[in-house]
Amino acid sequence: MTYECYDADREHYAASLTLDAQSNRLAWTALPGQDSLLVQTPYGVDPARNAEALRELLERVCGARLPEGRFHTLNSTISVRYVGAEEKARNQGCRANGEACTYTVFPCATADEVCRVYVAGGRDSMSSPRCDVPMNIRAEVTPWRSRGAYWFFRREAPTEFFRVRFPDACPENYRDGDLEYSVGNRWRIPVTRQMMERGEFYVRTDRKPVLIPRNAGVRLC
């Protein structure tokens, strides 16, 4: 299979890409009978700016026509999914492949072992082929107080620790270091996936730690 990139034209159209957060499904507008190529990149990255690099990746990694039904990894930061016209019509789009990333849809056509991808530059606010999907993380940073026995009653006593708590489940595609914490701007420690999966961790300090997103697509709430 050979992959070729062309400038978008009136006969090949894909735009208005959106994500339904409730169903976790991507939907877009395309011409009837037209196939589409979804490209997943780091948050804010537009693959149309370097279409030749995308073409080379597709040809080197994939070789043959991409099987439909799932995303395929091209490298550590880019994944793609081929969505045929029948699949799009049947499923009204497809499931997303995670958060803290950007999805872009390109019209494409495959014939005679050649996949032609039609790339449009720029971004129309009303009918964009791109969709930025942030990863929203809830976090609570509070002083940790221990319970001690004092004669006939128990009361909480302050400690030298702060507790960092994540009330929700760890996002599926959270990566080590997407968040860091800092104390007094003296040092920064990555928050690993294991720490987030535990739901909480403790920092021994007399100053409140500050959580800092290190991934442009991560939002603290």
Image (tube, helix red, strand yellow):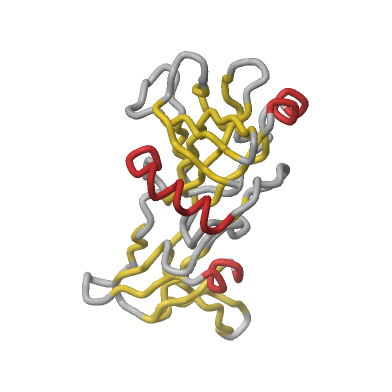
In this rendered view, identify the residue nearer to me: 202 or 24.
24
Q: Residue at x 37, y 21 (%)?
A: 125
**Residue most extreme to the front:** 112
Query: Residue 189 in the image: x percent, y percent?
Result: 36, 75
Task: Determine the residue positioned at 40% across, 42% down.
Answer: 47
Image side of residue 19 versus residue 42, left or right: right
From what the image shows, is residue 205 above or below residue 115?
A: below
Using the rendered view, name the quadrant where residue 109 is placed. top right
Residue 211 seen in this snapshot: yes
Of residues 162 and 92, which is closer to you in this image? Answer: 92
Q: How many marks?
A: 0
> In the visual, does 97 lie left or right of 133?
right
- Image spot of residue 59 (x, y percent): 52, 52
Q: Is residue 78 left or right of residue 149?
A: left
Q: Nearer the viewer, residue 64 or 12?
A: 64
Residue 157 at x, y = what percent? Answer: 46, 77
- Residue placed at 48% from the left, 36% from the top? 104
Residue 215 occupies quadrant: bottom left
Figure check: 138 above or below 94: below
Question: Could you tell me residue 149's position as x and y percent?
Answer: 58, 84
Up the image or down, 58 lies above or below 140; here it is above
